Image (cartoon, rainbow, N blue to C red):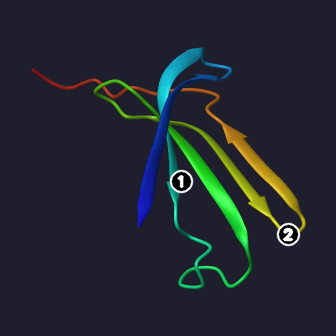
Amino acid sequence: RLEVQALEEAETEVGTFEAFRIEPDVFSGQLFKQKGRMFVWFSNDEQRLPVQLRAQIGIGTIAASLTGVEREEVAP
């Protein structure tokens, strides 16, 4: 289960993205036994890049942010 919560600006090394903030239900006891919350921001464009992640767990907060994008060339 996941919840789409908001459309926000997410700042990364690559730039600022308009992004959906999603909260997946990973701390309900199914995947992780401990309590916490996780938020993932996906860009609001056709690529839907995961641009940011923040997990709040018992011992602290884990944060990750997009630092680069590699695009594959598509042959004609």
Along the line of sight, which residue is nearer the eye, 42 or 36?
36
Outermost residue toward the right in this view = 59
Query: Mark 2 sits on what residue?
Result: 58
Quadrant housing residue 27: bottom right
- Dot 2 falls on a residue whose secondary structure is loop
In the image, taking residue 76 as reference, residue 8 lies left or right, namely right
Up-down relation of residue 26 to residue 60 (above or below) = below
Q: Distance of mark 2 from mark 1, alpha carbons?
A: 17 Å
* Left or right relative to 74: residue 51: right
How packed is label 2: few (under 14 Cα within 10 Å), some, or many (20 or more)? few
Could you tell me which quadrant the N terminus lies in? bottom left
Q: Residue at x 28, y 23 (%)?
A: 73
Q: Position of residue 66 (x, y in %)?
A: 61, 32
**Label placed on residue 43:** none
Counting labels gives 2
Q: Residue at x 53, y 53 (%)?
A: 23
Left or right: 34 as drawn, with respect to 38: right
Q: Identify residue for label 1.
A: 23
Q: Earlier in the sequence, mark 2 or mark 1?
A: 1
Q: Residue at x 54, y 25 (%)?
A: 8
